[in-house]
């Protein structure tokens, strides 16, 4: 069992979730149940699954939840790129930083999954 709040990956994933909420706040109202909801749910899923896995009894269980978090990272990345392509998000420092942080969490997640695979 791990203290998830001390995990750097969880802390960074929380930053991503917070920034995903901020970046989607200005989406049009007709996207409230579309991309806005999808982005927020996938963003929240990342730190949530890391936390849930950290609270499990075995490293194997933790690894399974890291796999789910990895899928949510890919889902969020896709939704952010689509939002940019649709003109809902502009290419700016905030957007670029969010993508960079997301890629960093994906790398950290992959490293943890490999660690628990041995």
Image (cartoon, rainbow, N blue to C red):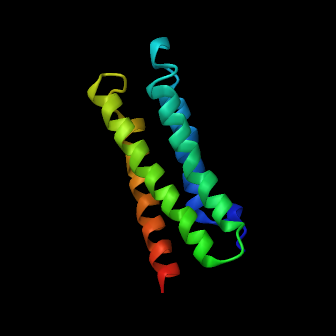
State whether residue 100 is above or below residue 80: below
Viewer-nearest residue: 57 or 17: 57
Q: Quadrant of residue 7?
A: bottom right
Q: Residue at x 31, y 30 (%)?
A: 84
Q: Residue at x 46, y 24 (%)?
A: 34
Q: Residue at x 63, y 52 (%)?
A: 48
Quadrant of the drawing holding the N terminus? bottom right
Residue situated in front as seen by the camera: 12 or 60: 60
Q: Residue at x 70, y 61 (%)?
A: 5
Q: Is residue 101 visible?
A: no
**Residue 94 position in % (x across, y down):** 42, 37
Residue 95, position in %: x, y?
Answer: 39, 37
Whole-percent x and y of residue 78? 35, 41
Indicate whether 98 appears above or below 107. above
Say how many tags the image has.
Answer: 0
* Residue furthest bottom in the image: 118
Locate residue 113 relative to residue 5 in the image: left or right. Answer: left
Which residue is outermost to the left?
85
Quarter of the image holding residue 57? bottom right
The answer, for residue 65, to whether it is visible in the render is yes
Using residue 70 as the reference point, say whether residue 64 is left or right of it: right
Point out residue 106 in the picture as x, y percentages from the top left corner. 42, 60
Q: Is residue 91 left or right of residue 111?
A: left
Residue sitting nearer the eye, 71 or 87 = 71
The quarter of the picture where residue 59 lies is bottom right
Q: Is residue 8 above or below residue 15?
A: below
Measured along the vertical axis of the image, is residue 38 above or below residue 107?
Answer: above
């Amino acid at each position: 069992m791990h203290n998830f709040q001390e995990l750097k990956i969880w802390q960074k994933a929380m930053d991503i979730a917070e920034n995903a909420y901020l970046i989607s706040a200005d989406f049009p109202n007709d996207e409230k149940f579309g991309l806005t909801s999808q982005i927020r749910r996938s963003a929240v899923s990342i730190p949530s699954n890391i936390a849930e896995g950290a609270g499990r009894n075995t490293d194997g269980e933790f690894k399974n939840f890291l796999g789910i978090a990895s899928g949510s990272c890919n889902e969020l990345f896709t939704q952010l790129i689509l939002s940019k392509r649709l003109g809902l998000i502009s290419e700016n420092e905030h957007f670029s930083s969010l993508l960079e942080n997301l890629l960093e969490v994906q790398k950290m997640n992959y490293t943890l999954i490999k660690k628990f695979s041995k």
